[in-house]
Structures are given as structure tokens and as C-alpha cells.
Image (tube, grey):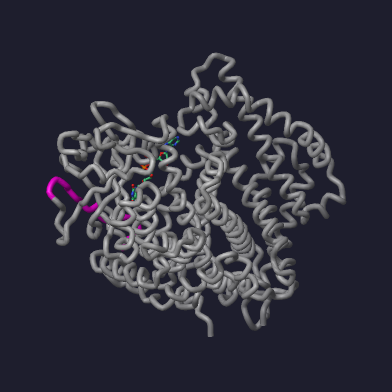
Amino acid sequence: MTAVPASIPSPDPDLLTAYLDAPYADVSALVRAQLAKRAEILDLQIEQPEGEFRETVLEALRDMARTGHTGLGFPQQYGGGGDIGASIASAQAFGYSDLSLMVKAGVQFGLFGGAILHLGSERHHARYLHDLITGKLLGCFAMTETGHGSNVQAVETQATYDPRARQFVIHTPTTSGRKDYIGNAAAHGQLAVVFAQLVVGGEGHGVHAFLVPIRGEDPQPVPGVTIEDCGPKLGLKGVDNGRLSFDEVRVERDALLNRYADVDDEGRYVSSIDDDARRFFTTLGTLVQGRISVGGAALSASKVAITIATRYAGRRRQFGPPGSEREATLMTYRVHQRRLLPLIARAYALSAAQQDLVVQLHESFSFDDREPRDRRELESRAAGQKALATWHTTAAIQTCREACGGAGYLAENRFAALKADTDVFTTFEGDNTVLLQLVAKGLMTQFREDFNDLAPIDMVRFAAAAAVETVMERTALRQLVERLRDAVPSKMDDAGLLDSAYHVGMFRWREAHLRSSLARRLKRGVDEGLDPFTVFAGCQDHMITMAQAHIERVVLESFVASVARADESVRPVLEKLVALHALTTIEADRAWFLEHGRLASARSKGVTAMVGRLCADLASVAEPLTDGFAIPEELIRAPIARRG
Ligand SMILES: Cc1cc2nc3c(=O)[nH]c(=O)nc-3n(C[C@H](O)[C@H](O)[C@H](O)COP(=O)(O)OP(=O)(O)OC[C@H]3O[C@@H](n4cnc5c(N)ncnc54)[C@H](O)[C@@H]3O)c2cc1C
């Protein structure tokens, strides 16, 4: 007997999967099946000590490389699949399995391989792509240094051109210039893409990427390279993160990944992009796929946690009505419903937005005719969604662990590794807070090409001078009309609570308000004669809130649009998820909406009541909704979630 009334028809999980996996359903299913065959890695993660598990992960990586699914994003002539969108779908599916494997594969194929593919030229492709796709050549992506993580433009590693020898001299000048946290460096990597300040003829040209051998056939470092192990970490014990220092290591002239700049036969620096900062950000922009993969894989990990906790909630019984023979399931309880159902709704929402992002990436990288502005919008969206998805994952895993009580604490039920391994997703591939600043800057400068770096000075001046008028013009009238409507509660308003146009309107209004008030604050600071850095620093929290509101709106719009395209038999339940996702978000920020006169107190209470009703309705179909994630039983693995 289930204590939860079945108030809505159970959706067909296969149709939900088709909705969630489109347009890469085949690839997603194939990679999940391949990972399911190797699911014992999830046990080995618990049983093996670090050193042994690193070798297990390496073996699994090479094994997966043999399936061809890790090379989907590379050109077919080198053994790849020639389909960048499919490659992201594949990388996302890795998030259902062991996350050390996902990260190690991400470093090898996404970062190391992606840098050679996107920053190198034909000669690099011909020499390296085939071997790296098959896992014969293992590599690192060495960007971060001990002294600089988020501010990559300030890395200290030097690459000085020696015209006589026609070589670059790679050198670590200080301990803070040592490469740090580098995946694949401590044990397995043979070749590293090293980001360093290029100096030619005594003149600095900014950060460029170089291919530098770090190990030969034997595991010893090559002369001049020092490799240290970063030591035990909070999680990801199967990833060999290391530190690299270079003592005047010489590499040939063609070691420079030369898509955007080169040193010619005469020893002159040449580049198709004149401005150093713009070249740097164009270079980084081509690596956007790694960020998108991390956001997608994080979402997959959150779905594992949500699936386990949802199944447990349907089976675990505690307390119940006095005198009854059986206790009630956890899912009977409103608090439990409120913990899990909004997570399911948010996972669906973020998945819909992720699909759109992957399609946008695929189009942007498959066709050369895209406007630079489109690329910047893509980079901004990728940055914002990565932040939202990874924060969602951290929060979801914690909530789901708690929702499983003591059982959730046992390693066999997966939360220990999920928590530890995904924790750093909020930091690598761009720290989330720093990424949201990039989003804000893009919005305030309307994605103009000349605002590529994080330098606050130009951004503040531009936003102060131009953004105020345009943002205000666009939003002022609508704001006034909507504000009047919502300040006056009426019975009719309750009906609107389930209307997606109402949800989108609220999200848009919040974003527009935050944007125009930010522009006003920046302008006021400049008008008062404050220096732009002080103005920028003083408004930083406002910028982050605005960026987050923007991405929340983008996610909601994607969700609404994708539900309209879904099979009509699952559309009603998806529409309830849209409403739950939107109203939970509004509820979480209701203090702000109330403060700004956008919600009357009666309506605010109505939102809370509606969230409760939706949770109760959806509780009866929570399990089919998580079945839609299509995680193979072998990968769910947790005994508390086992079926039959
Ligand atoms: C397990 C692991 C694997 C990694 N793998 C690799 C790899 O393979 N290759 C590689 O190159 N790197 C790798 N990294 C490094 C990773 O990319 C960096 O840790 C990340 O970019 C953040 O840099 P940081 O650690 O220096 O943090 P910092 O930049 O010092 O940030 C520290 C804190 O300060 C805040 N902060 C920074 N700047 C600002 C600002 N302007 N305004 C407000 N707040 C700010 C951040 O939000 C953050 O909370 C890895 C890291 C880890 C932990």
C-alpha cells in the first residue's frame, strides 16, 4: 500500500528519457550502457587504496577509449567522431559512474585533447590526435599555478624564444609560478599543454600554450622538469593531480600551439589578433566545451543522488497514523516531499537548459560563420550554467544524503564518493563566483568585443555611460505595468500561479530590475568621482546576484520551451515540474520580491501553498520521474535503492 495518493497518471519513463536526452539520445544510451558494463569501478573506488585505484581509473579510461565514445569530438581523419555535440553528451554520461574516471577523461580528451585540437594547427593534429584519442599518449592541461588560478592572465611561467636555437625556453621563475593541481601530472601524463608568458626579442606577448614533454616512456620526469604529487585530496582519489616546475626546459619552435599566433622563420612574432587581451580571451573561449561538460556531468551526478534518495523515500517507513499496522513511507511526509521534489524539478530544468547549450556549442563550433558576439554569448551562458549546475549538484547531494539518514552515510550507498568527488566542480573549470562575474560583465557591456578581460575600469565606465539608458528604456514601462498588477492581490492571481508566462515574467522582471539598478549604482559611483575599481568592488555582490538572476531566467525559458516540444502524454507532468521549479525559486527569493513590491504578502503565501500542493501531487510519480534519468541499475548500485 502506498500512503501517497496517486493524483496524477504515472508518466512513461522512456518518454521522459527521450525528452531529457534529445537530441543525443542514442549516444547517451550507448555510453551509459558501456559504463554499466564497467560498474565494478564503483566498488573498487571504495575498496582500493589511492595508488591502486589510480591505475584502475587509467585502465578504465583506456578501456572506454576503445569504445570510441571518448573521441567523438575529434575529426574523423584522426579516428574521432567529428561530432562535438555528441562528445559533450558522452562526457555528461560519465557523471553517472565514478567521477575520478569522468575527471581523468575530461583532462585527457576535453582539456589536453581540446587544447591541441582548438589551439593547435594541422601539424599538431597529425602528430598527436590519433594517439591521444586512443589513450596511447596521456597528457595534462597545465594552466593553473600556485599563485594564480582564476587570474590566468597573470601566470608567471615563461616561454622565451631563443632565435639562434629556434627553440622556446620554458621556465618557472618562482615557487608561485609552479603549475599546481594539474590532472594526470603526478603519475601518468607524458606531454603537457603548458600556459606561459611568451617573450620574443625581449617583448612580452601574453599567455600562449606550448606542448612540453614531462615524462618519457618510463615514469621518470624528463631532465629539467620537476614533478610532485599534490598529495591526498578531499575526493577524486583516482586522479593523479600534480605540480610541475620547469628549469629552462627547451622545446622546438613548433611546440607553440599556433592557431592564433606564431613565431615565424625569421623569429618574428605574428598573430591574426593584434590586441593581447583579445587574443588571450579568444584562446580561452575555444576551451568552453570543458566547462559545458563539467556542468553536464555534475548534473548527472546529482541525478544519481536524487534517484537513490527518491527510491529510499518510497520504501523507508518511519512513524505513521496511530493504530495503523504499518508505518508511513518517508515520501508521505510533506517535509520530505519538499526536500526531494524541487530537486527533481531543478534537475529537469537544468537538463533542458543544458541541451540548448550543447546544441548552441555544436552549431558554434561546427560552422565558421558565427559572429564573435554569438561566441561571447555562448561563453557567458556556459559560464553561468556551469555555476548553477555545480551548485545545484553540491546542494542536491547533501540534501539527498540527509534524506537517507544513517544509510546515506555508508559508502556503499554512493553518497560519500558523490559528495567528495563533486565538491570541487564548483571550483575547477572556473570558480563559480568568478564565472558569474564574467556573466555580469558580458551583460553590462552587451557582449561587446572590446570588453574581453575582467578589467573593471572600462566595464564600469561603459556600463555607467551606456547601459543605464538602454536597460531602463526597455524595462521601465513593463515594470510599471507588472508592478501595478502584482501589487494588488486578487482571487484571479492564484490561477496565474501555474501559468508559465507568469513565472517567466517574474524571472524577467527580477533580472531587469537588478540590471538597471546595477547600472544606476555604477553610474552614481562614477559621477561621485570614485575610481572605477572601487565602484566595481562595491557593486560586486549586486553583479553576482544579477548574473544569477539572468541565468535562472535563461534556464527557465529553456525549460518552458522544451516542455512545449515534449510528447503530449508527458507534457502535463512536465508542466507541473516547470511550475514547481519556478515557484520554488520565487519562494526562495520571496524576501527580495516582497522588498521590491513585486509580490504582495498574500500572493507570497499563495506561492508557498502552491509549492506544497505541487510537491504532494508529484510525490506519487517521483520514482517514474527519476526513472526518466535512465541510470542503469548497475550504476545506481546503492543497496538502499535496489529494486526487487
Ligand atoms: C582537483 C583539482 C583538479 C584541478 N585540475 C586542474 C588541471 O588539470 N589543470 C589546471 O590548469 N588547473 C586545475 N585545477 C585548478 C583549478 O582550475 C583552480 O583551482 C581554479 O581555477 C580556482 O583557482 P584557485 O584555486 O587559484 O582559486 P582562487 O582564484 O584563488 O579563488 C579563491 C577564492 O577567491 C574567490 N575569488 C577569486 N577572485 C575573485 C574576485 N575577483 N572577486 C571575488 N572573489 C574572488 C573565488 O571565488 C574563490 O572562492 C584543479 C583544481 C583542483 C582542486
- The residue shown at (31%, 51%) is 123
On whether residue 549 falls in the magenta region, the answer is no
Compare residues 467 and 402 and report the one nearer the observer.
467
List the single residue furthest toward the front. Answer: 265
Image spot of residue 259 (x, y percent)? 37, 44
Q: In this view, does 576 lie to the left or right of 534?
A: right
Residue closest to the eye, 552 or 196: 196
Report which quarter residue 307 is drawn in. bottom right
| Residue under the point 45% across and 74% down | 635
Relative to residue 471, is residue 399 drawn left or right? left
Residue positioned 48% across, 73% down in the render:
30
Q: Quadrant of residue 359?
A: bottom right
**Place of residue 507 in the rendered image (x, y in percent of width and height, measured from the top left):** 69, 45
Per the rendered image, the range of residues in magenta is: 223-238
| Displayed-image quarter of ligand 1 | top left
| Magenta segment, prevailing SS (helix, strand or loop) | loop
Q: Which residue lies furthest to the right in this view?
A: 491
Check the image and name the residue furthest to the left: 223
Image x and y of residue 235, in percent: 35, 58
Q: Which residue is situated farthest in the bottom direction here?
A: 644
The residue located at (27%, 61%) in the rendering is 137
Q: Is residue 224 magenta?
A: yes
